[in-house]
Image (cartoon, rainbow, N blue to C red):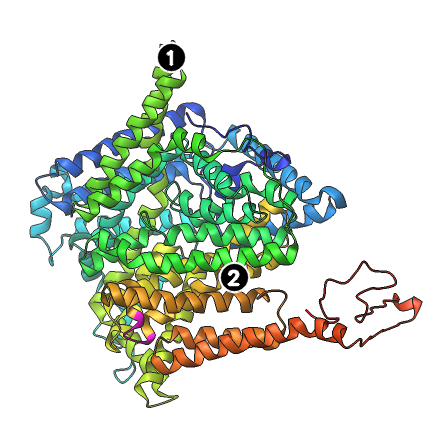
């Protein structure tokens, strides 16, 4: 299989980092158990069989229909959660505590080797903890009872000797038997427990609150918003368990038909060495630039998104390889960590394999996944344009010193792993031809496996036993890993069905939508102001919600609550969906619980909060550009809602806005920029993103004025030199005497001046 080339492989203690442990600690999902070898093998075999069942559904779907398939899928997958996940508590708070403890370890380390000592200590601690758990980390008797109970309650509707069979169960819709209600109630509790084990307490609490609202709605005064007739327990269970919504609604459907297949595809890429290939290629493409390490992080983050569907996992995997190079080049720990976090999160936003919520968008809006990819193209370009500009600015401010390793050539690296691009291209081409995404990704997976096998054979000619073992590792390992990776998503999607069903049955979504709009109307009666304020309120609401729950659940909840408000005010459905999707994703780089930044700081040894703010700085275009989708009809062209010409001109104008944002946030135009230029840049960015003729004129004028002021201030030292004016400032020796002479360009204690005026930021 592919491996890192000797020239590109970084050196340093960061290689000691246990990447899997860091991902497990800081990802959205809680870490899995360390099972004994025999039980781990058994779980792997079950996952492999479930993968074959999922693949069979793609080409030979079950005759009884999609709901029948979802019931069996949940019956096979959900019990594995109680085997693979511990009954512990906490998620983001636990990760933050670990990060704080790790930071203290870093501070206690020697000054010259703080980061490396921290990484080594963290890896050692994680490894030792893993060994301790391995002795007694298998499921307890209670866990096995939950496994059996989960299978029985999930499979109950399709087992003839229990419920009378699938058709009989559906015929009882609206008039469930006592046993039906009991089984549905038990499954409700089991789904909440599975969700708690994989993602923490917050989402189950949300589900319980919505359940109570559905049950006690009749007790809310009639004249209060949100009052409804209320539902009894039988009605609620019927909606969740028997109806083609609830547990078996769109979220679980997407998890069982799209997400699981893409996780298998990502596992295939990982097993065939795509990650190392993408990083090596990125290094080789930028080897002549001093900013090469930073540029590599951005490009590799985009490419690694095809391997990992998690922004945090991408940031950690990328950081374990690139941090030693970033450190050697002179990047501060916090800047490097922020860069890793922002680049990792960008992977979820980038075609052709967006995050899980993108598949839900396609289902909710009843459009093809290929169209959703098209909507994401321009925002992705703007996102990475912002990151690249911020990296360029930092490379100049920090004065990085990067010397590429000798012999690092792009063409040999490309020849080694070009087939990874072929499998990605197959997805794009087949989607463009109108093929269903679950079929397109299966074909891409087969191509990836095929090329991986060819590479294995060529690398191990004359070793048939080794070849067979390696081929089996790719095939079996990818299918098994794909199912394991989808366990948390399955739990989240089943739990999200509780919230969606409640909102649909009670009309709560429209109520909250009206509250948002009325809140905006309290400030102004102008329709434009109302739309702008509603969008800002919605952005804050989605971001805050994302701090508490995973991206997929955050999008689902926000769509049914915030989406109607945006659509009521005239925002196109596509623009509203992408708006919510982006803010749901950005919660992973939003303080104070930015998991991607916490994970990155664990790699670099930087301060956690400072790393979070650096990540925000790099990702700032992503926080503002989505507002442009919704503020104006022209802005919707950024998500392909205004034709090709509209997409082109809005992209160009927005690119200037992103450049202004990068200059303002980074404090650099041609050199360090003062606050007058930075404020003008921020104003220019805001005006340009409104994408109206008058505002764009104001924006370009503000940007031009910022550049002019910057050029004038930059030339002041030269003018002062021409007139022979000299300025000398002397302080007492106790206050660290500093003498600067502008007229001659010399200083008593400093090297010749570079022409930068004294006191410039």
Q: Quadrant of residue 213?
A: bottom left
Image quadrant of residue 228?
Answer: bottom left
Residue 500, image x, y percentages: 26, 61
Depicted 659 relative to depicted 349: above or below:
below
**Residue 593 visible at all:** no
Specify the farthest residue to the right.
Answer: 733
Q: Nearer the viewer, residue 41 or 280?
A: 280
Is 15 drawn above or below residue 468 in the view shown?
below
Secondary structure of the residue carrying tag 2 is: helix
Residue 353 x %, y %:
32, 47
Q: Which residues are magenta?
A: 631-635
Local packing at callout 2 (Cα closer than 10 Å; few below 14, some 14-19, many 20+) is: many
Left or right: where does residue 586 sit relative to residue 111?
left
Q: Residues within 10 Å of mark 1 (few under 14, many from 20)?
A: few
- The residue shown at (20%, 48%) is 432
- Residue toward you, 653 or 170: 653
Disc 1 element: loop
């Amino acid at each position: 299989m592919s491996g890192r080339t000797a020239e590109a492989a970084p050196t340093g203690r960061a290689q000691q980092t246990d990447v899997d442990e860091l991902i497990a600690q800081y990802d959205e999902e809680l870490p899995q158990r360390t099972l004994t070898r025999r039980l781990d093998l058994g779980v792997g075999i079950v996952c492999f069989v479930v993968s074959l069942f999922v693949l069979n559904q793609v080409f030979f779907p079950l005759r009884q229909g999609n709901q029948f398939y979802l019931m069996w899928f949940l019956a096979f997958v959900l019990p594995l959660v109680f085997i693979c996940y511990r009954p512990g508590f906490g998620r983001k708070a636990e990760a933050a505590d670990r990060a704080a403890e790790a930071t203290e370890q870093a501070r206690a380390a020697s000054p010259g080797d703080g980061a490396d000592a921290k990484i080594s200590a963290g890896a050692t601690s994680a490894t030792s903890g893993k060994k301790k758990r391995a002795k007694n980390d298998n499921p307890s008797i209670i866990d096995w009872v939950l496994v059996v109970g989960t299978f029985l309650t999930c499979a109950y509707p399709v087992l003839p000797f229990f419920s009378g069979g699938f058709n009989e169960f559906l015929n009882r819709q609206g008039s469930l038997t006592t046993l039906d209600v009991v089984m549905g109630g038990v499954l409700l509790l089991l789904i909440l427990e599975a969700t708690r084990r994989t993602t923490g307490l917050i989402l189950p609490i949300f589900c319980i609150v919505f359940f109570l609202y559905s049950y006690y709605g009749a007790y809310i005064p009639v004249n209060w918003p949100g009052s409804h007739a209320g539902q009894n327990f039988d009605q609620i269970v019927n909606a969740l368990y028997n109806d083609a919504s609830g547990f078996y609604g769109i979220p679980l459907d997407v998890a069982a038909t799209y997400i699981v297949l893409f996780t298998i595809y990502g596992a295939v890429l990982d097993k065939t060495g795509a990650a190392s290939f993408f990083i090596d290629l990125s290094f080789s493409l930028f080897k002549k630039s001093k900013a090469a390490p930073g540029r590599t992080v951005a490009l590799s983050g985009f490419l690694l998104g095809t391997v990992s569907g998690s922004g945090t996992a991408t940031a950690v995997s990328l950081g374990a390889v690139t941090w030693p190079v970033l450190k050697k080049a002179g990047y501060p720990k916090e800047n490097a960590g922020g860069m890793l976090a922002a680049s990792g999160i960008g992977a979820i936003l980038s075609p052709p394999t967006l995050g899980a919520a993108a598949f839900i968008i396609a289902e909710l809006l009843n459009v093809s996944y290929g169209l959703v990819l098209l909507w994401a193209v321009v925002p992705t370009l703007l996102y990475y344009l912002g990151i690249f500009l911020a990296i360029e600015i930092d490379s100049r401010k920090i004065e990085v010193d990067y010397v590429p390793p000798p012999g690092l050539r792009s063409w040999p690296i490309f020849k080694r792993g070009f087939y990874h691009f072929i499998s990605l291209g197959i997805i794009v081409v087949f989607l463009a031809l109108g093929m269903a995404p679950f079929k397109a990704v299966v074909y891409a997976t087969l191509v990836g496996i095929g090329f991986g096998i060819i590479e294995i054979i060529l690398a191990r000619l004359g070793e048939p036993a080794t070849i067979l073992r390696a081929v089996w590792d790719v095939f079996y390992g990818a299918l098994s890993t794909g199912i394991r990776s989808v366990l948390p998503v399955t739990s989240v999607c089943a739990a999200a069905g509780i919230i969606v069903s409640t909102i649909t049955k009670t009309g709560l979504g429209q109520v909250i939508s009206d509250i948002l709009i009325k809140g905006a109307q309290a400030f102004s009666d102008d329709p434009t102001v109302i739309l702008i304020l509603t969008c800002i309120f919605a952005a804050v609401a989605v971001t805050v919600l994302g701090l508490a729950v995973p991206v997929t659940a955050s999008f689902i909840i926000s769509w049914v609550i915030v989406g109607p408000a945006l659509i009521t005010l005239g925002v196109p459905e596509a623009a509203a969906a992408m708006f919510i999707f982006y803010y749901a994703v950005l919660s992973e780089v939003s303080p104070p619980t930015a998991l991607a930044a916490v994970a990155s700081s664990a790699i670099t040894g930087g301060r956690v909060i400072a790393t979070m703010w650096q990540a925000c700085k790099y990702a700032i275009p992503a926080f503002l550009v989505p507002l442009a989708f919704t503020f104006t009809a022209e802005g919707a062209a950024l998500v392909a809602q205004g034709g090709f010409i509209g997409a082109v001109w809005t992209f160009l104008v927005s690119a200037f806005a992103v450049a202004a944002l990068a200059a303002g946030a980074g404090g650099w135009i041609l050199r360090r920029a003062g606050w007058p230029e930075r404020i003008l840049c921020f104003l220019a960015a805001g005006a340009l993103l409104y994408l109206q003729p008058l505002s764009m004129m104001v924006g370009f004028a503000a940007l031009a004025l910022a550049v002019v002021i910057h050029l004038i201030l930059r030339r002041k030292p030269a003018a002062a030199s021409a007139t022979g004016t000299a300025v000398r400032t002397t302080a007492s020796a106790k206050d660290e005497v500093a003498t600067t002479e502008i007229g001659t360009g010399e200083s008593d204690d400093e090297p010749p001046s570079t022409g930068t005026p004294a006191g410039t930021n």
